[in-house]
Amino acid sequence: MARANRRLTRGARYGRYDGGPDPLAPPVDLAEALDAIGQDVMAGYSPEQAMREFLRRGGRDQAGLDDLAGRVAERRRELTRRHNLDGTLQEIRQLLEQAVLAERKQLARDALMDEGDRALAQMQLDALPASPAAAVSELDGYDWKSSEARADFEKIKDLLGREMLDQRFAGMKNALENATDDDRAAITEMLGDLNALLEAHQRGEDTPEQFDEFMAKHGEFFPEGPENIDELLDALAERAAAAQRMRNSMSPEQRAELDALAQQAFGSPELMQSLAELDGNLRSLRPGEDWSGAERMEGEQGLGLGDGTGVFQDLAELDALSEQLSQGYDGSHIDDLDLEKLARQLGDEAAVDARTLQQLEKALRDTGTVKRGSDGRLTMTPKAMRQLGKALLRDVAQRLSGRQGARELRQAGAAGERSGSTREWAFGDTEPWDVTRTITNAITRTAADGPHTGGGVRIEIGDVQVQETEARTQACVALLVDTSFSMAMDGRWVPMKRTALALHTLITSRFRGDELQLISFGRHAEVMDIEQLVGLEAKWDKGTNLHHALLLANRHFRKHPNAQPVLLIVTDGEPTSHLEPDGEIVFSYPPDPVTVAYAVRELDNSMRLGAQTTFFRLGDDPGLARFIAAMAKRVGGRVVAPEADDLSAAVVGSYLGSRQGDGPGASGDDFGGMFGRGWY
């Protein structure tokens, strides 16, 4: 048995896995995709646009659709720059020159030939026209003295026949080399049966049995193995249309030469009649193919009719791939990519890159990161928002910890920060155990009871000590973010959204008892949920309506009278609009004193409600700096002027300072330490 197994192993053959995606391939990098998509969403893209943009760009080690499209375009340029369409005519000229030269040599050395006949033959050869088609026509009845010359001349007719057939049936040129009369007769019969089948199909009179009978008789001419009449039609029409586009791309002189030469193909004008009939049937049955296109082919490498048709098929495939990769048509989807064509044109590596992009989008949907709605559009799921928010919080933690030298720890207490004291556990306690004191109590108690036979330490309820924590007050938080156009124009749009998402994630994951409300204010103010704010597109919105935003914030505070109000205001401009009692929005620039008075009055109301207020001033405008400083001083608040990239850390740190009871006067230098003690 072992010997047999060794024989089987030695005889094994290994090939490329073709059963679908590589089962050993590494998983796609969802983290990178989610981060890129989230950044684009916060920059104003819709989730659908953001997903498409990531698929276009690709990742650090992953080619995107744009890269693949560039390679497709380069492949297309390479084909058109390398080739010309004179290959068949060049080959005919070469065979013709060989035949004439061999005949001249034979005439010169034939000592038995009559001098008059020799002179007449030489005159006929000297008078041949420059046109290959005209020369071939004149020599059709010539009495060749050289067998070598006669063979070369017959090759011209054979070449033309094979090229004409190769245009319609790929591979026919090589298959019919040195064809016999029986081979030619088989082709003539196949063409007749094929035209009869297509004409019956056009009339709706064909049957599956008729197709099967045709394939059983002539299947050797169709290596693609079509399984029905439609597959046969598709393959034939695609190649015939490519042949027509090649003809359209030729010069009028080239077309005239080939048309004249075609009558000599296989020495049988009936062949051209059958092919013309076939082309007519295919045009009628597949009018949607491109029968009128043309290309400029100005390279140095000549293409024969069959090879040229193949190149024009390649160009059509490349055009189709370019459209698929553009994803610019209605209803486009990355699954539309034809991986087989991509591998054929660009190689297996390109197909692997495209398949990875398909798997990436599928993985994002399957893992609940993005979902496609009933309208076909992609949206970010709440799970995706949480993941993105956690990533932002990690970034905030690194910024704060790096700035303060604080260590990153996890929050242990459920009710607040540890006070350092312990007490005996009581029913209902959720505080963490003090393990050291609990074990010490158990050891002390068991030692007093004397030695025992069992190993280890026996812990009883009375031994357990829990860590006392400071009481934690519920906070009612209002984050007011400026959404006027200057925020987007000056590059503060994405930092503003990152800040809102980071704070939202922190509160919903670590401070679930706190009440957060997100309020955007441009020309008017609006309460938004996090998905709406993150997906908000920048608009030309003249106005900074701080008054309206404060009205909404104070309404939020009044709904939670037992909570500590925390007011966080992010802005890069002075108030330039306010809300009248009748609901009308009034805009004025420069700021009108009435608008400023409305905002100050509502800020005073926030102070009366006990709000701890922090302004986050963006930009270096001196007038704004003076205004914000005066507002903060009026209500005992503070001002932070972070760079845009540090805005998230500043806002989160300020919130944490308020949660620790440090109050409005707390130093910003303390916030990193608070965050580092575990609040994420």
Image: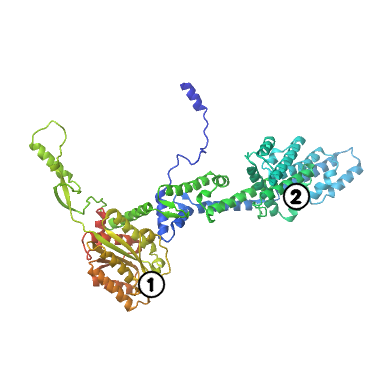
Q: How many marks?
A: 2
Q: Give the alpha-carbon distance from disc 2 to disc 1, as whole Å.
A: 73 Å
Q: On the image, numbered disc 2 is attached to which residue?
A: 258
The x and y percentages for residue 313 are 63, 48
Coordinates of residue 377 in the picture (x, y in percent): 46, 55
Mark 2 vs 1, N-terminal side: 2
Q: Is residue 680 visible?
A: no
Q: Amino acid at mark 1?
A: Gly
Q: Is residue 255 above or below residue 618?
A: above
Q: Secondary structure at mark 2?
A: helix
Q: Residues within 10 Å of mark 1 (few under 14, many from 20)?
A: many
Q: Is residue 674 above or below residue 218?
A: below
Front residue of this view, candidates 490 and 367: 367
Secondary structure at badge 1 equals: loop
> To which quarter of the image does residue 50 belong?
bottom left
From the viewer's perspective, is 445 left or right of 537?
Answer: left
**Residue 40 appears in the figure:** yes
Name the amino acid, label 2. Answer: Leu
Query: Does residue 254 appear left or right of residue 418 in this picture?
Result: right
Task: Name which residue lies at 50% across and 50% down.
Answer: 334
Towards the viewer: 542 or 451: 542
Residue furthest front as drawn: 205
Front residue of 396/241: it is: 241
Q: Which residue is mark 1?
A: 543
Q: Which of the 4 image quadrants contains residue 505?
A: bottom left
Whole-percent x, y for residue 327 in the image: 52, 54
Q: Which mark is drawn over residue 448?
A: none
Residue drawn at (72%, 47%) of the image: 88
Location of residue 668 by image quarter:
bottom left
